[in-house]
Image: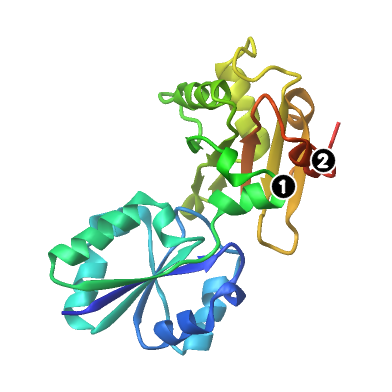
């Protein structure tokens, strides 16, 4: 029986790891995945140098197959999966945890900062006023779901904010930017039935990093803003804002 550690990297580089996390990584066979989120360039290379051995990168297909991690658990007493953000913000990692249990192994969890809460905190929004999180996929000629708009409408009808997580494919160098995402929302809602042109929208860019930036303004204005490098997240606020939320958002206003 081996032990599988799920280690959160947090929202910036390797400096966001706790001392306990580093202790675990030093004595583990380490895998790293960046398909659910992406660390700043050079993060994994510097961490590998600090640990004194390479990290094995797993793309989505290999991680979802579960084979590399389960094979490592069969040969090593301690295995770690390093995840940008918080490990269990992604259902794939919960599935791997269950697979390890079925194979007779134990697991441990070292959480870290996640965009699921950090975006709200950075912008100054109350986290308990958020509804269901929405994921917006990269555009495809044969795939243009309207379900994200349905979720936004549902949350707004309950006077809740909506966090939109934007798709990425780091292995292809593709990241859905906030500007592109706002354009997709308008393409799929041309009349502005769900999010009108004058509706307030916020963008949190590179939350947790030194160059984090926030943006707030009407939908029509933010569509033409340059948000800088990824990663980005969008928040569609509830129709009514608490006065402290509005004051916090105003510092990010871009009209």
The residue pinned by badge 2 equals 247
The residue pinned by badge 1 equals 124
Along the line of sight, the residue nearer the viewer: 33 or 121: 121
How many marks the image carries: the answer is: 2
Q: Residue at x 63, y 38 (%)?
A: 234
Under tag 2, what secondary structure? helix
5 displayed left or right of 105: right
Q: Are marks 1 and 2 in contact (CB under 8 Å)?
A: yes
Query: How many C-alpha atoms fall within 10 Å of the one at disc 2: few (<14), some, or many (≥20)?
Result: few
Label 1, label 2: how far apart the Cα atoms are: 8 Å
Residue 157 position by quadrant: top right
Q: Is residue 230 visible?
A: no
Q: Is residue 60 visible?
A: yes
Q: Quadrant of the N terminus?
A: bottom left
Say if 97 sits above or below 145 in the image. below
Q: Residue at x 19, y 60 (%)?
A: 99
Q: Residue 50 appears at what percent x and percent y?
A: 53, 87
């Amino acid at each position: 029986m081996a032990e599988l550690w799920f280690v959160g990297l947090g929202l910036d580089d390797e400096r966001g790891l706790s001392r306990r996390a580093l202790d675990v990584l030093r004595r583990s066979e380490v895998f790293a995945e960046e398909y659910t989120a992406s660390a700043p360039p050079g993060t994994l290379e510097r961490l590998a140098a600090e640990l004194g051995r390479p990290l094995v990168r797993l793309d989505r297909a290999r991680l979802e197959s579960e084979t590399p991690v389960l094979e490592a658990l069969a040969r090593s007493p301690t295995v770690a999966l390093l995840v940008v953000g918080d490990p269990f913000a992604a259902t794939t990692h919960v599935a791997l945890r269950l697979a390890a249990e079925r194979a007779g192994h134990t697991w441990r969890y070292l959480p870290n900062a996640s965009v699921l809460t950090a975006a709200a905190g950075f912008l100054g929004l109350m986290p308990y006023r958020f509804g269901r999180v929405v994921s917006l996929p990269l555009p495809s000629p044969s795939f243009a779901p309207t379900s994200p708009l349905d979720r936004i409408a549902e949350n707004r009808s309950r006077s809740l904010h909506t966090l939109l997580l934007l798709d990425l494919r780091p292995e292809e160098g593709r990241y859905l930017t906030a500007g592109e995402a706002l354009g997709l929302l308008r393409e799929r809602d041309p009349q502005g039935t769900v999010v009108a042109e004058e509706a307030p929208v916020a963008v949190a860019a590179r939350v947790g990093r030194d160059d984090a930036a926030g943006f707030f303004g009407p939908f029509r204005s933010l569509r033409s803003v340059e948000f800088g490098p990824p990663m980005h997240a969008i928040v569609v606020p509830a129709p009514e804002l608490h006065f402290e939320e509005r004051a916090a958002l105003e510092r990010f206003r871009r009209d």
